[in-house]
Each structure stands twice: as C-alpha cells, then as structure tokens.
Image (tube, helix red, strand yellow):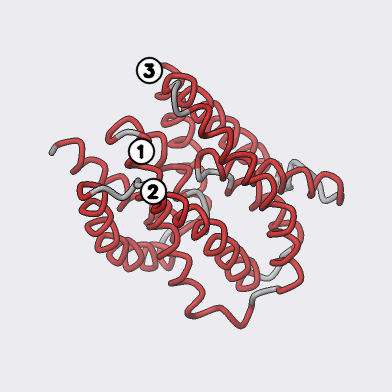
Amino acid sequence: MAQNLLFLLVVFLSNVVQCVTGFAGTVLAMPFSVLLVGTETARPVLNAVAIAASVGVLLKTHRSVNKREFLKILAITLPGMIVGSVLRGFLATNGVLFMRLLGGLVVAFAVVNFIGFLRKKNIFGDGNAVGAGLLVLGGVAHGMFVCGGPLIVSYASVRLKDTNEFRSTLSAVWVVLNTLLLVSDAVGGSFTPDCLKLLGLSLILLIFSIILGNKLAEKLSKNVFLVLTYVLMIISGAALLLK
C-alpha cells in the first residue's frame, strides 16, 4: 500500500513538471516508479497516462501539428522502437541489467540536456544526419523504457520553433508511439486488476496535475523548473544505478 501511494505521488508530481516544462514527465517518473512498483506495472501505467496527457494537449492545439515533421519523426522513430521492444524482451529476464541501463539512460539525458540548457543551445546541433540518429535512438529507448522523449525532443526543438507547433506535433507523436506500446501491453496481459486500479487513480491525479501545473507555469520561472527537473532526473537515475 505504501509503495502504491508513493507511486501515485510520483505520477502526480512528474505530470506537474511535464505541464510546466513541456517534457520529462515519464523520464522523471520511470526510475522512481520501477523502484516502487516494479517494471511490469510502472511501464504500462506511465505509458497510458502519457497518452491521456498528450490527448489533452491535442484537444486544444491539434490545428498546429506540423504534418511534415510529424510523419518524418514517425517514419524514422518507429523502426527504432521495434528494435527497442525486441531488446526489452531480452532484458525481461535480467531485471538488474534493465535497471542499470534505464538508470544510465536517464542520467545521460539529464546531463546532456542540462549542458544544453547552460549553453542555451541544442548540444546535438541541427544537422540532418545527427537529427536522424537522434530519432532512431529515441525510438529504441522508447521501445525499451517508454523514455525516448528527450532524444526526440532534442530533434524537435531544432526543427519546430513555434511553441504551439512544438507541443502539438510532439503530442501527436506520443499518442501514436504510446498507443502502439499500449496495444502491445494489452495483448501481452500487462494490465492486471492491480495495474488497472493504479491506472485509474493515476488518470484522476493527472487532471489535478494539469490544473496545478498550469497555475505554476503562469507564476513561476520555467528555468527554475528545468533545473529542478534535471537534478531530480540525475537523482532518480542514480538510484537505479546504485540499487
């Protein structure tokens, strides 16, 4: 019971951060959630919550979707996601290795993005070859951990300068990618009664996360939240590495 309550708190707080910063919700929540409720519960629940959050964004911003970039991101990311899903199956029998890889991935994401934040420049640059590589790796990471967002965001932040276009296009991408993972989870029997209970409670909390996040976004500095997000990502990733 205590672990479930802490998990719900993580879901709530991570989605507040997601609402304020526009990214990092699942990446921030996943390491803590794996430690609290295990991979087989954390991954499908956080994935389903991410779909709901993305649909919420699209309800207001769907007209701003950049269809060209949306299709390009999907075309390059999907093959990588298939590879990631296959790799996840191999890692299913080695929980320790899974946690080490996830922890290392989250710490690397946080450090790279923090450096980019300090430099006020995308650390990966904007070359087409680099961009395609980011999308492929993002797809692999998304298929394995539902955590490929920062790599895909790194590409999108260069290609999509308008805020509404950025948010709506990425939200459309998450809906497609995460729905595919959702179908895979459903077919694989991941949604047990306990998992569905946590999912239902998480979706209720998501509503309050969005309300609080929107209010905080109006009053507090986004830069403060970004720094806090990177620090928390490093701590959460390190916790998995040291477990």
Circle 1 Cα neighbour tier, 10 Å, few/some/many (<14 / 14–19 / ≥20) = some
Inspect the image, locate mark 1, and give the three-letter code of the amino acid beneath it: Glu
Q: Residue at x 58, y 49 (%)?
A: 149
204 vs 18, left or right, is left
The residue depicted at 63 percent of the width and 78 percent of the height is: 64
Instruction: Read off the residue under disc 1.
Output: 40
Instruction: Place residue 123 in its image quadrant.
Output: top right
Viewer-proximal residue among 109 and 192: 192
Callout in the foreground (1, 3)? 1
Closer to the camera: disc 3 or disc 2? 2
Secondary structure of the residue carrying tag 3 is: loop
First in sequence, mark 1 or 3: give its number: 1
Please identify the quadrant where the C terminus is shown.
Answer: top left
Label placed on residue 44: 2
Q: Earlier in the sequence, mark 3 or mark 2?
A: 2
Rendered location of residue 183, percent (x, y): 46, 57
Q: Are marks 3 and 2 in contact (CB under 8 Å)?
A: no
- Check if mark 2's residue and mark 1's residue have beta carbons within 8 Å: yes
Percent x, y of residue 221 = 48, 57
Residue type of the residue flagged with mark 2: Pro
| C-alpha span from label 3 to label 2 | 22 Å
Label 3 sits on what residue type?
A: Lys
The residue carrying mark 3 is 243
The image quarter containing residue 16 is bottom left
Left or right for 212, reference 112:
left
Question: In which quadrant is the N terminus drawn?
Answer: top left
